[in-house]
Image (cartoon, rainbow, N blue to C red):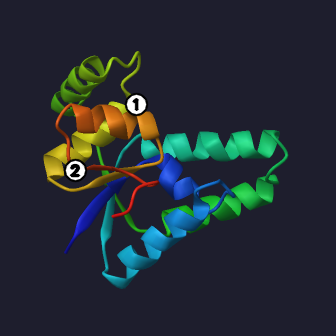
Amino acid sequence: MTTVAIDANVALALVVPLPYSDRVVQLFTGWQARAVQLAVPALWGYEVASALRKAVTAGVFTLEDAVTAVRHLWALNLQEVPGTIERHRRALTWAEQLGQAVAYDAQYLVVAEELKIPFWTADRSLAAGAQAAGADWVHWIGLSG
């Protein structure tokens, strides 16, 4: 079975109208057709819930919409990779290498690197930085692939 890692913003584009939602739907349609497993770090759920809460406070979603979105996203049957001391250590190393003040994004890189799978992100600068560091398995959703 093929597996890919995704960040929270990629999944959120399935339920929140974002400029890149059409591209994400296209990717997910292909992944579903090929029975691709999705992998995420344990922090993914917290990021998704926080983003949905922001959508509610911004008036984009009602609370009911956000709860429905949570149900839809958790139905994606994600492989949630728990944090470990070693994974956090590697995330700190990635964050240092990318010049990031926090290590959230780096957690996604660690999951993809460890599982030896592609990582898809909506964060153009994260993708560019990781690719510049030699991570050719990182893909920005704005690019073909």
Q: Residues within 10 Å of mark 1 (few under 14, many from 20)?
A: some
34 relative position to 9: left or right:
left
- Label 2 element class: loop
Taking the spot 14% from the left edge, 53% from the top edge, the residue there is: 116
78 relative position to 9: left or right:
left
Residue 43 position in % (x across, y down): 42, 40
Residue reaching furthest bottom?
A: 33
Q: Which residue is mark 1?
A: 104
Query: Which image quarter is the C terminus in?
Result: bottom left
Q: Which residue is mark 2?
A: 137
Dot 1 amino acid type: Tyr
Dot 2 amino acid type: Trp
- For residue 83, say whether it is visible: no
43 relative position to 15: left or right:
left
Query: Which image quarter is the N terminus in?
Result: bottom left
Tell me the CA gap for discs 1 and 2.
Answer: 18 Å
- For residue 15, say whether it is visible: yes
The image quadrant of residue 128 is top left
Q: Which mark's residue is nearer the viewer, 1 or 2?
A: 2
Taking the spot 43% from the left edge, 69% from the top edge, the residue there is: 27
Which mark is on residue 5?
none
Residue 136 position in % (x across, y down): 20, 47
Disc 1 + disc 2, Cβ < 8 Å: no
Taking the spot 46% from the left edge, 40% from the top edge, the residue there is: 123
